[in-house]
Image (cartoon, grey):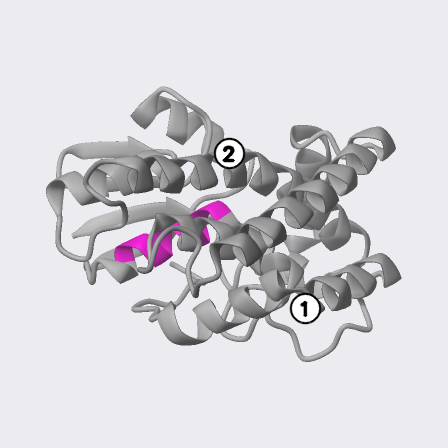
Amino acid sequence: MRTLYQFPLSHFCEKARWMLDHKELDYVAQNLMPGAHRAFARLKTGQNRLPILRDKEQWIADSTQIALYLDEHYPEHRLLPVEGRLRQKVLEIDEMTQELGRHIRRWMLAQALSHDHESMEILIGEKGYLRQFEKFSKPLLKTLLSKGYALTEDTLAQSREYIKETVEQLNQTLIENKGAYFAGSRFSLADIAVCSMLAPLLAISGTPWERDSFESMSDEYRDYQTYLSELPLGQYIKNIYRHERNARIDWRGV
């Protein structure tokens, strides 16, 4: 059985789940504790980040490397064109979303730690040591995340500006493409990358960021959600999730 080591709320892990689901491959989503995951990741793959896919004896880190691995070993339902200009375009869009994803992660973590009780509950998990000792684990987790992701006023300002500029660029690219997809006439890694990175800003139904109420969220988050929802890019993301996101497992993991 394949295992995807993940954080449930990570949009990079959502990207990996989506790729495996698109390929119709069986797997288990195994949750790791933020902070403590670094030792595990370095031991298995020589780097610090998730997601990590274990496929038999193979350990593959980084969502883009997972995509390339899956297309090589499981070519049905390809994520990228085999060659040519269109393949390069897909990879360029994917690369753009990597940096965008890091800034969205920082901004959303700041939202979760300051305003969002629901997200903190997901981070703690439904069972296990973090839940059993939540009186101590919650403040510890907040400290680890704040330091680990450099959540300061200056870095958050930088992230807000980067998100704003990149969203405008992606929105213009989508308009110029004049199609239902970001690269060519078929669904690809480019669409998965764009949609999974921006999904936390839209609280899309069926995702880890879905919520019944936005009262606990900041005015800044609510305002940006409204802005993005009204763009062609926001409408495209909702449409892609509606028609292309066929989840095969529960994102909450085990």
Q: Secondary structure at mark 1?
A: helix
Which-is-in-front pick, marks 2 and 1? 1
From the viewer's perspective, is 77 left or right of 223? left
Main SS of residues in magenta: helix
Q: Residue at x 58, y 54 (%)?
A: 198
Chain-order first, disc 2 or disc 1: 2
Q: Residue drawn 24% across and 40% down?
A: 54
Q: Nearer the viewer, residue 242 or 13?
A: 242
Residue 94 in percent (x, y) is at 44, 40
Question: Secondary structure under badge 2?
Answer: loop
From the viewer's side, name the closer residue of 159 and 89: 89
Question: Within 10 angstroms of label 1, few (less than 14), some, or many (20 or more) residues?
Answer: some
In this picture, which residue range is highlighted in magenta? Answer: 12-20
Q: Residue at x 15, y 39 (%)?
A: 72
Residue at image x 52%, y 41%?
Answer: 97
Q: Quadrant of residue 5?
A: top left
The residue under label 1 is which amino acid type?
A: Ser
Gap in Å between the C-alphas at discs 2 and 1?
35 Å
| Quarter of the figure that contains the C terminus | bottom left
Q: Say whether residue 146 is left or right of residue 32.
A: right
Q: Is residue 179 visible?
A: yes
Where does residue 184 sit, x and y in percent of width and height?
Answer: 35, 53
Residue 148 covered by magenta stretch: no
Type of amino acid under label 2: Ala
**Can the viewer see residue 10?**
no
Q: Which residue is mark 2?
A: 36
Q: How far from the left and from the top, in percent, is residue 143?
A: 73, 36
Provide residue 200's location: percent of width, then percent of height: 61, 58
Above or below: residue 212 compared with residue 218 = below
The furthest residue to the bottom: 212
Say which mark, if any, is on residue 229. Answer: 1
Q: Which of 63/119 is in front?
A: 63
